[in-house]
Image (spheres, rainbow, N blue to C red):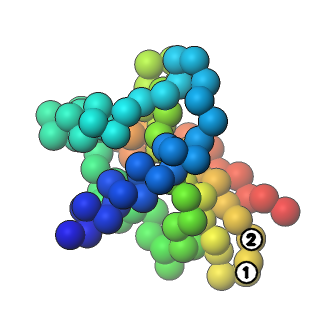
C-alpha cells in the first residue's frame, strides 16, 4: 500500500511537470527500471531523506538529465521553508539541495 501511494505521488508530480523534450520519463518506465534494480524505489529514496530531517514531502517529479534519471523532491521544513532536493535515482546520492526563500 505504501509503495502504491508513493507511485501515485510520483504520477501526480509528473502530470504537474511541464513537458520538455528529452526530459520526460513515464511512470511505467520508472516501475520497470525499479523492478530490474536499475533505479532505487521511491520508498528507498524517502528512507534516505527522512521527513524529520528534510521536511514533509510536497511534490515529487522524475526526469532524465543527460541519460540519468533524477528524482526531484520538494519538501516543507518545520521552519516553513520549501526545500528542493535533486537525487540520482540510481544510487540515491544528493546532487543538489536548494532552500527557497
User: Going by the picture, which residue comes out furthest to the front?
Assistant: 15
Query: Pointer 2: residues within 10 angstroms few (<14), some, or many (20+)?
Result: few
Percent position of residue 17, x then y: 59, 41
Percent position of residue 8, x then y: 36, 57
User: Going by the picture, which residue comes out furthest to the left?
Assistant: 36
Label annotation for residue 81:
2
Q: Are marks 2 and 1 in contact (CB under 8 Å)?
A: yes
Percent position of residue 98, x then y: 71, 52
Q: CA distance from mark 2 to mark 1?
A: 6 Å
User: Going by the picture, which residue comes out furthest to the right?
Assistant: 101
**Residue located 39% across and 62% down the image:** 46
Label annotation for residue 79:
1
| Quarter containing the C terminus | bottom right
**Residue located 65% across and 74% down the image:** 77
Apparent side of residue 82 relative to residue 64 in the rendered image (left or right): right
Is residue 53 something one can see in this rendering? no
Apparent side of residue 6 relative to residue 98 in the rendered image (left or right): left
**Residue located 20% across and 69% down the image:** 1
In the rendered image of this protein, does residue 75 appear above or below residue 51?
A: above
**Residue located 54% across and 73% down the image:** 56
Query: Pointer 1: residues within 10 angstroms few (<14), some, or many (20+)?
Result: few
Label annotation for residue 58:
none
Amino acid at each position: 500500500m505504501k509503495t502504491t501511494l508513493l507511485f501515485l505521488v510520483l504520477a501526480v508530480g509528473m502530470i504537474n511537470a511541464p513537458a520538455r523534450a528529452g526530459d520526460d520519463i513515464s511512470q511505467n518506465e520508472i516501475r520497470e527500471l525499479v523492478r530490474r534494480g536499475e533505479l532505487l524505489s521511491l520508498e528507498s529514496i524517502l528512507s534516505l531523506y527522512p521527513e524529520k530531517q528534510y521536511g514533509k514531502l510536497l511534490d515529487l517529479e522524475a526526469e532524465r538529465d543527460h541519460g540519468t534519471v533524477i528524482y526531484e523532491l520538494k519538501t516543507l521544513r518545520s521552519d516553513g521553508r520549501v526545500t528542493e532536493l535533486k537525487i540520482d535515482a540510481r544510487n540515491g546520492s544528493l546532487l543538489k539541495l536548494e532552500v527557497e526563500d
